[in-house]
């Protein structure tokens, strides 16, 4: 495949972004780069799992030692966190309701807590993803998302995900639910794979999101017969 000038620039940028990440780990003050663009603007990390929200999900939501470790509970926490994808929303709920579990938490009380937060002008969702609301009979977006999570667990989706042979199968299970298009279904499959309930190779399956598609278009003159996922 014929590459453009952007191809080399992309890899240089990615390498320097990762080097910046490592420098920040050893030097909290900086400066961490001589690149004027990286120094002046915020960019995601080269690796998704290194980002702040992903690190919070892994450390605090999935692996914190005092949390239940069954597949159902891990699935519940992971999806409840990722449906909003906002640390402040998770901490608000746990600050008011205590530790969030499928067995011990009341989804109606979670909904009412989010209602009050919304009425107070607090943001519930991260702007990182466009989060379409599934149409499950509720007026408010967060109520529909809670209903979606309830349906997933009542359908024994955590157990089916745990038994799935690979990431593609997990993706297809998630994709069957309303409000989850290809991008979100893949993101949630990767998020669940961070947890101890799964251990699949991320290199075996991928869905290219809008940013990846845009980047590929900039890096290659012609991809020939190759798909974006290739």
Image (cartoon, helix red, strand yellow):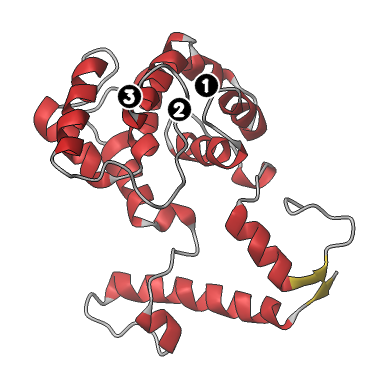
Residue 156 x %, y %: 48, 11
Q: Nearer the viewer, mark 3 or mark 2?
A: 3
Q: CA distance from mark 1 to mark 3?
A: 26 Å
Give the side of residue 207 with respect to residue 109, left or right.
right
Q: Which residue is mark 3?
A: 143
Residue 177 percent location from the top left of the image: 55, 23
Between circles 1 and 3, the one closer to the viewer is: 3
Count of number-bearing discs: 3
Q: Which residue in the structure is indicated by mark 1?
A: 162
Q: Is residue 65 above or below residue 88?
A: above
Mark 3 to mark 2: distance in Å? 27 Å
Q: Residue furthest left?
A: 96
Contact between labelled residues 3 and 1, with CB atoms less than 8 Å apart: no
Local secondary structure at mark 1: helix
Closer to the chain start, of discs 3 and 2, is: 3
User: Who is closer to the viewer here, 132 or 194?
Assistant: 132
Locate residue 2: give its quadrant. Answer: bottom right
**Sequence-first disc among 2 and 1:** 1
Kindly check if marks 2 and 1 are in contact, taking CB atoms under 8 A apart as contact: yes
Looking at the picture, does residue 99 appear above or below residue 81?
A: above
Spot occupied by residue 3 in the image (x, y as percentages of width and height): 79, 76
Residue 227 in view in this figure? yes
In this rendering, the answer to whether 200 lies above or below 136 is below
Q: Position of residue 168 (x, y in %)?
A: 66, 33
* Mark found first going from the N terminus, 1 or 3: 3
Q: Is residue 109 left or right of 70 when viewed as pictured?
A: left
Q: Quick one: SS at disc 2?
A: loop
């Amino acid at each position: 495949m014929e590459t453009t000038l952007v191809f080399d620039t992309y890899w240089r940028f990615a390498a320097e972004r990762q080097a910046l990440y490592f420098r920040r780990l050893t030097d909290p003050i900086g400066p961490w780069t001589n690149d004027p663009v990286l120094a002046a603007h915020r960019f995601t990390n080269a690796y998704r799992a290194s980002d702040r929200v992903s690190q919070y999900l892994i450390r605090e939501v999935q692996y914190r030692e005092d949390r239940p470790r069954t597949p159902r509970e891990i699935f519940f926490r992971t999806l409840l966190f990722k449906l909003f994808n906002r640390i402040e929303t998770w901490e608000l709920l746990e600050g008011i309701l205590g530790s969030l579990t499928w067995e011990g938490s009341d989804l109606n009380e979670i909904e009412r807590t989010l209602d009050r937060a919304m009425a107070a002008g607090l943001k519930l969702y991260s702007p990182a993803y466009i989060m379409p609301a599934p149409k499950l009979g509720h007026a408010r977006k967060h109520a529909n998302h809670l209903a979606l999570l309830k349906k997933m667990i009542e359908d024994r989706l955590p157990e089916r995900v745990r038994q799935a042979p690979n990431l593609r199968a997990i993706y297809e299970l998630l994709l069957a639910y309303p409000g989850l298009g290809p991008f979100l279904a893949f993101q949630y499959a990767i998020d669940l794979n961070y947890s101890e309930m799964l251990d699949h190779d991320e290199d075996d399956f991928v869905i290219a999101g809008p940013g990846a598609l845009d980047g590929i278009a900039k890096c290659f003159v012609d991809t020939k017969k190759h798909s974006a996922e290739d």
